Amino acid sequence: MQPTRTTARDVRRRNRSLLLSTLFFRAPLSRLELSRATGLSSGTVSTVTAELVEEHLIVEAGQVESAGGRPRTLLRVDPAYGNVIGVDVGETGVRVELLDLGMSRKATVEQPLPSARPDPAVVAEQVAIGIREVVVAARVDEQSVIGAGVGVPGMVEQGPTSLIHAPTIGWSGVALGQLLRERGITMPLFLDNGAKALGQAEMWFGAGRGARHVVIALVGSGVGAAVVTDGSTYRGKSSSAGEWGHTKIVYGGRACRCGSRGCLEAYVGAEAIIDRYRKARRGRAATGVDEVAAIEALIAAADRSGIAAGLLEETAGFLGAGIADLINLFNPERVVLGGWTGLALGARLLPKIRAAAKAHALAHPYDQVTIELCQLGPDAVAFGVATLPVAALLSHGADPRSRRRSSIPAPPGAHPPTGTQRPAPVTPACGFDCL
């Protein structure tokens, strides 16, 4: 292999990325503190921060007294520099959020999906409408949007055209980014699996902070996971790694939406839990207008119904056994359980889930792991995918919108603004392991 020559442009980009990332996660900091935190010289810190101030990416954030000298000026990333959008294409609806660069929500729009196996063109139209509506609701200019992350319930095969493979909703090789471009969405787009994006958010801001080896387990209507090893997400050959819901828990067991049998999702996904409860009650369905209400009703009924209590205990066993598989396979230091179903079950059954995991995991790796609940809430996928354009900004030290004018490579899942030529994708330097 030929050695790669590092250019002055590469060094400049790395320095900008390092300083921006440090300020994003640890601000406010003085230039002296930045130098100590990053290992960069004071001259480099002064030069690069001057550039970032001039570009309005960072701003002064007050002063702090120094020992015997002039007060030091504190710096931080400017939340008003721009906005980001997160789109959660779930299995029951589309949720769109607009946030500033400080990750504060400014507006949210939700729309139900017309069916459990929606037409990709219909979903693209709903997403495009949702993006426009959230911009209007937040009273911001569309040109202020740095980029939009789109999370989907399936595998996202990264490439010149990102293709979505989601058998549970009937999608195979769907170019959702292209469909959005055809509907007039011109901002930079970043597509990824919803569980992986939620995993990034939990690593940055939630229960994954401070750990390097983590599995974020997402349980909603379906089941997925984000595997973080040594601070970086593991994707596999075509980014399909983490399809935990389609590992087998019972040989020849219940039919799964993916077409196979015995999958974990066929026992602990919301749709499966509701169906198991209906069958346990000889055809009487759980009350509730939707899956969320039905799961809430089932959990509430467990205080007075032996059938409901028994089904929940069995579900905790299946979920714990599934987590044990993750522990045995990946040896994480932390497993984080999230998703709206995962959090609903965890709030009541976490001790039972931990006990089942302990019973099925190898003793030594289990002794090294903690099992915790996600901290960002049940509707955090949209927030999670909103971190994708932020990750691009931090990893390259420059605005994703500026790729039209620069040699900045696009990260996996990124779709450049209309009219630009998309460079070959590369793995971002800043993903789960920014700091």
Image (cartoon, rainbow, N blue to C red):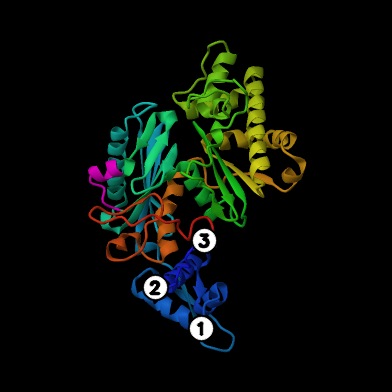
Residue indicated by mark 3: 434
Tell whether position 186 is magenta.
yes
Amino acid type of the residue tagged 2 in the rendering: Arg
In magenta stretch: residue 348 = no
Contact check, label 2 and label 3, Cβ < 8 Å: no
Q: How many labels does the image show?
A: 3
Q: Position of residue 111 (x, y in %)?
A: 35, 35
Magenta part of the chain: 178-187
Rounded to the nearest angstrom, the CA distance separating label 2 from label 3 is 20 Å
The quadrant the C terminus occupies is bottom right
| SS under mark 2 | helix
Q: Is residue 233 above or below residue 156?
A: below
Name the spot of residue 83 as percent of width and height, x first.
Answer: 35, 57
First reached walking from the N terminus: tag 1 or tag 2: 2
The kind of residue on which mark 1 rests is Pro
Residue at position x 39%, y 73% in the image: 9
**Which residue does the numbered mark 2 point to in the structure image?**
9
Judging depth in this view, the residue of 315 and 163 nearest the camera is 163
Find numbered disc 3 in the image and state the secondary structure of the residue it sits on: loop
Quarter of image, res 100 = bottom left
Mark 3 burial class by Cα count in 10 Å: few <14, some 14-19, many 20+: some
